Amino acid sequence: MNLRPYQEEAKAAVFEQWEQGNNKTLLVLPTGCGKTIVFAKISEDCVRHGERVLILAHRGELLEQAADKILKACGISCSVEKAEESCLDSWNRITVGSVQTLMREKRLARFDPEHFDTIIIDEAHHSISDSYQKILKYFDSAKVLGVTATPDRGDMKNLGQVFDSLAYEYTLPRAIKEGYLSPIKALTIPLQLDLSGVATQAGDFKASDIDTALDPYLHGIAEEMLKYCSDRKTVVFLPLIKTSQKFCEILNRKGFRAAEVNGNSDDRAEILADFDSGKYNVLCNSMLLTEGWDCPSVDCVIVLRPTKVRSLYCQMVGRGTRLCEGKDHLLLLDFLWHTERHELCRPAHLICENEEVAQKMTENIAAAGMPVDIEEAEVKASEDVVAQREEALAQQLAEMKKRKSKLVDPLQFEMSIQAEDLSSYVPAFGWEMMPPSQKQLDALEKYGIFPNEIECSGKAKLLLDRLNKRKAAGLATPKQIRLLENKGFQHVGEWTFDAANRLITRIAANGWRVPSSIIPSEYRGE
């Protein structure tokens, strides 16, 4: 099996990190981009160098999937370390191991700590848990590769405590652009779902609270699905098993061919196979299908388990991003979720890094009233945000110009009163170097000085002291000085307030023209 160009890049990047001494490195590939085939080929190369490889996963399906892919892609059989099965009596150089099994002290004690040369962690966002850490610490001399789908910033921060580096990241927009994943069109359904009363647990919305909040809307959601999903193959993610079962019944009453799967389903494999073959057109589940299940023909995803965790949201949507013959895009149905905070993952968060652009994109999709390609929507939202910023900046500059025209430039004032100590001031102490306080800025503006030009607290204090002394001495104000100097009068900084005020009154009465009897260059303000 030949690797795609980005998969070759990913594989080379991992070995490069290991060669550089970054023994614990991370590989990020979106769901559907073949992360299993990449670490299968990495495992093959490790075996060629005489190494033993351990592939860790937290679910049986992931272990079976990894072993099957390695056999098909590389022709290498794997041993299993799970329950009663063990790799210790096997000649195989690759072992797929259950975390729940290997984390036990008695099980670990069977192994030499240097038994494995390389450990690969599938769905590496789980690796921060105690069970994984226990295994990694036991085999602490092994090189480690973590593989995960697109993580959010919170995940990356946590993963940074486990891994030394990020070897390679392949983004969802790039995968779509290069034709390896299906384009995604998002449609916001005009149905208000109130989540304002939903509590948070372990960093995400509490499933039981979501269930309670969601229940009144299930019939309305099914009605909306009739408009958009009747001819589509749809996967619906719900918060709890009982809700998933209830919604499945509602959909069947509406005329859909719906099935439900959960962790307790004895006939799960049969239901999934029947859905794949087309016997059912809607599959309801309570977060069971977020990892390790592939059905490329899925062309509609509905997330009724709102989340704040971007990696989880990407995994749910990722169930429909694989390419399939006759499928030109994935339809992602979104709802008008009402929360008190802007923390909910929406279609925009699949590709947006900037929260401002994501919010604008969410607004634009909601206003469109029709399916919108998310890449086109991001471009439009980015342009809108730039336009809004430019408009806001232009307005701000206009207001600043208007404000500045009413106030006196501090340098101009310093020159007018010939204050060399102000114009040559250099801060010496720490407090003097600090930015001016808001109180100082407000006081300067009250005196008629444009405060934005004052760079430090020490300069602001010195200038305010001078202004206070001038006021106490009854001398001309900054605004009086500027107005009269602009009319050609000289040394106005030495005039009294009253003298400047009398002259300004005469000029105002003369239509803001200097009276013909006064020669500004010779006038002294007595």
Image (cartoon, rainbow, N blue to C red):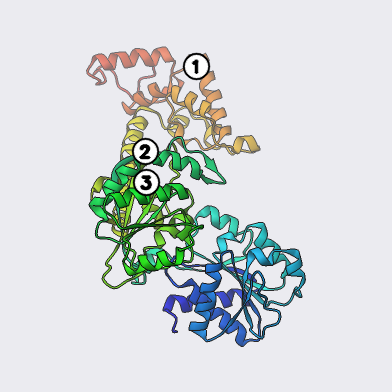
Residue behind mark 2: 216
Q: Position of residue 300 (x, y in %)?
A: 32, 59
Residue behind mark 3: 359
Apparent side of residue 110 relative to residue 67 in the rendered image (left or right): right
Q: Secondary structure at mark 2?
A: helix
Residue behind mark 1: 471
Report the residue at 48% width, 40% height from top. Answer: 209
The quarter holding residue 367 reads top left
Of circles 1 and 2, the one toward us is 2
Label 2, label 3: how many angstroms apart (C-alpha)? 27 Å
Q: What's the amino acid at mark 2?
A: Pro
Apparent side of residue 271 relative to residue 124 in the rendered image (left or right): left
Query: Looking at this view, is 248 or 373 the one in front?
Result: 248
Label 3, label 1: how many angstroms apart (C-alpha)? 51 Å
Q: Position of residue 459 (x, y in %)?
A: 55, 33
Query: Looking at this view, is 339 or 411 the one in front?
Result: 339
Of circles 3 and 1, the one toward us is 3
Q: What's the amino acid at mark 1?
A: Lys
Q: Secondary structure at mark 3?
A: helix
Report the residue at 36% width, 52% height from top. Answer: 248
Apparent side of residue 172 relative to residue 208 in the rendered image (left or right): left
Q: Decide: is 6 above or below 397.
A: below
Report the residue at 32% width, 31% height from top. Answer: 402
Q: Decide: is 233 above or below 486.
A: below
Q: What's the amino acid at mark 3?
A: Gln
Circle 1/circle 2 CB separation < 8 Å? no
- Is residue 398 something one can see in this rendering? yes
Instruction: Quadrant for the N terminus, please.
Output: bottom left
Disc with the residue nearer the chain's start (3 vs 1): 3
Q: Residue furthest front?
A: 266
Q: Decide: is 201 above or below 78.
A: above
